[in-house]
Structures are given as structure tokens and as C-alpha cells.
Amino acid sequence: MKFVDEALITVEAGNGGAGCLSFRREKYIPRGGPDGGDGGDGGSVVLLADENLNTLIDFRYQPRYRAPNGRPGAGRNKTGAGGNDLVLKVPVGTTVYNDETDTLIGEVVCNDDAITIANGGRGGLGNTRFKSSTNRAPRRTTPGSLGESFKLRLELRLLADVGLVGFPNAGKSTLISQMSAAKPKIADYPFTTLAPQLGVVSLAPHRSFMITDIPGLIPGAAKGAGLGIRFLRHLTRTRILLHLVDVAPIDNRDPVDIVETIADELEQFSPALAARERWLVLNKVDLVATDQREASIQSLKESFNWPFPVHVISGVTGEGCELLAYNLMTRLEVLMSERREDPEAESVERIWLDRMAEEAHKRIAELREKYRVKRKGNDLGDGDDDDDHEVEVILVRD
Ligand SMILES: Nc1nc2c(ncn2[C@@H]2O[C@H](COP(=O)(O)OP(=O)(O)OP(=O)(O)O)[C@@H](O)[C@H]2O)c(=O)[nH]1
Ligand SMILES: [Mg+2]
């Protein structure tokens, strides 16, 4: 299955059925009067969040949707049947934009959230409606109104509490597999992870959080290098970021330098995302000789002078991972209860989320445009976005 987090679709709601022109005709009842019923309303197109879905792939294969029309009214004051709503199931975290005006229509954030994205036309009026004291035999009816139709862009942002960022090979997938039941592909070459992965970290019953791993970032990612920054979108719904760094990289690069590079890329992508709570995780500590460990970690910590918590772990041996999970859970619980109890905290968080979403949307739209122009220049116009990956996004719930 392909992981697809963007899709362009066309939706057309059903038209309203026409009102009916009819007069009552019965034996022994001369001039029975008007009895034309109203037309039925056209079906609307509705998006419904389904937690079992995690890709927009189906919308790539079938990009057009049309809800049925309302039926016309009939004699004997019969109202036409309404067209059923067409329900499109989408993953939780899907945002809808009007592609022509680039305006946000809405998003579904919880399972079973629904939004109407195109309203069905109203049924027309039958001639019975126009009966009055001065016109007992009206011949007037109205046609049904047209259903709305739009070209829409669906964008999926995975919902997770914690998001991982770091260079390729930093050990992000190893950590997610250590902390959760997810089993992403791990290998000693860069760009092993080609699409976001989700895992559930479960500490105790009712104490769990969701963590997401996205493909590694490299210098120039903001300009499209490597797999680029498009997957950063999936971090804009997270509450805490974990910035993972290999403390003993094989090329002997300075970890401080590596971390700054990624911070720059984040900043270019979305200043709001870069300013979020981001914990530093010094990984692969097992590779540092035991007798040097304390001193070298201490000096690293000092050179980072990090404003948020710093953790020292080994994703392979599991050292420090339990404490990290526990501290993350505790912090998330504090943040959640703040949001619940303090309306001010809730609205501040909403502002952050909106800012990140807007900045991410803008940056990805710019990149998309850049690729489009480039593709045109290369005359490779195959009509498809080059953001498909033959990989599966896996959500493991224990
Ligand atoms: N010794 C040691 N090796 C580690 C540790 N964590 C990860 N590795 C190794 O580092 C390599 C890369 O690990 P991954 O988890 O695939 O790294 P990633 O950050 O997901 O990499 P990409 O998906 O390419 O971005 C693998 O060979 C891992 O076995 C660790 O704590 N200690
Ligand atoms: Mg990986």
C-alpha cells in the first residue's frame, strides 16, 4: 500500500429535484385544485473520519465523487425522494482546502468527525405551494437548485503526541521500535524510513501516547534535498518533538553542528514548529567507551545548553528509554490537564496549531509549485505528484 498524504478530488453534490405541476383529477371532484409535490433535496458530500484509515491512497485512484440528485415531486402532493448523502471516509487528521481559492474548509480531528464539503441542491416547489385566494389553479413550480461542486485538496497530517526529528541514521526508527510495538524497518544506511510511521507507547492501562517517526532530514531539506521537508507536516499536530542525535557518528561530525543543521531546516519550514517544545535525545550512548562516557556526555550537554529536557539513551540496548517514555507521558499529562482546565492555555495551543498548520501548508504549496515548474521544464509532465512512496504506513496499537 502506498502512503499518500495529499489528494486532489472533485466533488459534486446532487441537484434538487424539480417541483411538480399537477392537478387533482378524480371522478366527481371537478377542478380538484393543485396537488404537485415538491422535489427532493439533492444528496450532499460528507467527509467522515475513520480511525482505521491512514492514507489518502483511494482518492488518488478515484478522484471524482458525485452525490445523487433529488427526485422530482409528483402528483397527489408527493415529495420526491431526497438523494442520499455521499459519505467519503478519510483518515483522522485530514484537512480539506478549496484548491481553487486555497481556503481552508475544515478538518476532522476525532474518529467519526464529519464535515459537509458540498451541499446538495434544495428541492423545487410543486404548484401546490403557489395556491392562494386569488390563484386557485397555479401553474407555477420551481426547479430544484444545483448542488455545490468544488475542486478540493485533501491533506493528511498524522495525529501523534510526540514527533521524532533527526538526521538519517540517528536511530529514530530504532527508538520507536524500542518504545512501542511498531516494527519499522531499521538499517545502517540513510533514508531507511521513506514515510511516516506511528507507534503507541503504552506505560500502563490508560497511560499511553502516540509517537511518530518521519524520514530523516539533511542539510538543504527545506529546499527539497533528500526526501525534503514535506513529511514535517506530520509533526505539526504533535505536542512535543524529540530531536535525536547520534553522539558517536561514524563520520565524526560534531553532534552540536548536526543538531543546529536540523534546527535551521525546521526554522525554514515553520518558525512556529521550530519554537515548539523540543527535547534533545543523545542517542547511541552505548558506542561511547564506559570510562569516557560521563565526561563526554557532560561536555556535550554543556555545549548544547538546551532549553528543554535532555535525555541520554541507547535505542539498541534500551538504556534510558523507559525513563524517556515515563517523562514524556508525565509531561503530556500535565499539558493535557492544563488545556482541559485553563481556557487560556487551550486557546494559546490552538493558536500554535493554526500557525504551524498554516506555515506548513504554505511551505509545501511553494515546494509543490517548484516541482511543477521543474517538471514542466524537464518535460516530464506525467500528471502525477512525485510524492508517492511504495511503502506502508503502519499503525500498531499494541
Ligand atoms: N550502537 C547503536 N546503534 C544504533 C542505536 N540506535 C540505532 N542504531 C543503529 O543505527 C542505524 C540506523 O538506525 P535507524 O533506526 O534505522 O535510524 P533512522 O534515524 O530511523 O534512519 P532513517 O530512517 O534512515 O532516517 C541502524 O544500524 C541501527 O541499528 C543505538 O542506540 N546504538
Ligand atoms: Mg528510520
Image (cartoon, grey):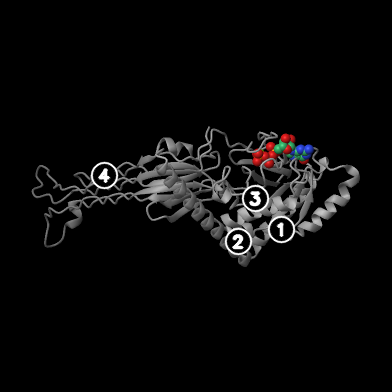
Label 2, secondary structure: give it. Answer: helix
Classed neighbour count for the residue bearing mark 4: other residues with Cα under 10 Å, few (<14), some (14–19), many (≥20): many
Q: Which residue is mark 1?
A: 334
Amino acid identity at mark 3: Asp
Label 1, secondary structure: give it. Answer: helix
Q: Which residue is mark 3?
A: 161
Near-viewer residue (188 or 239): 188
The quadrant holding residue 318 is: top right
Q: Residue at x 53, y 54 (%)?
A: 360
Q: Which residue is mark 4?
A: 80
Total residue callouts: 4
Q: Is residue 191 above or below residue 98?
A: above
For label 1, being within 8 Å of ligand 1 is answered: no
**CA gap, disc 1 to disc 4?**
55 Å
Of tags 2 and 1, the one toward the viewer is 2
For label 3, being within 8 Å of ligand 1 is answered: no
State which tag comes first along the sequence, 2 or 4: 4
State which tag comes first along the sequence, 1 or 4: 4
Near-viewer residue (274 or 395): 274
Q: Which residue is mark 2?
A: 349
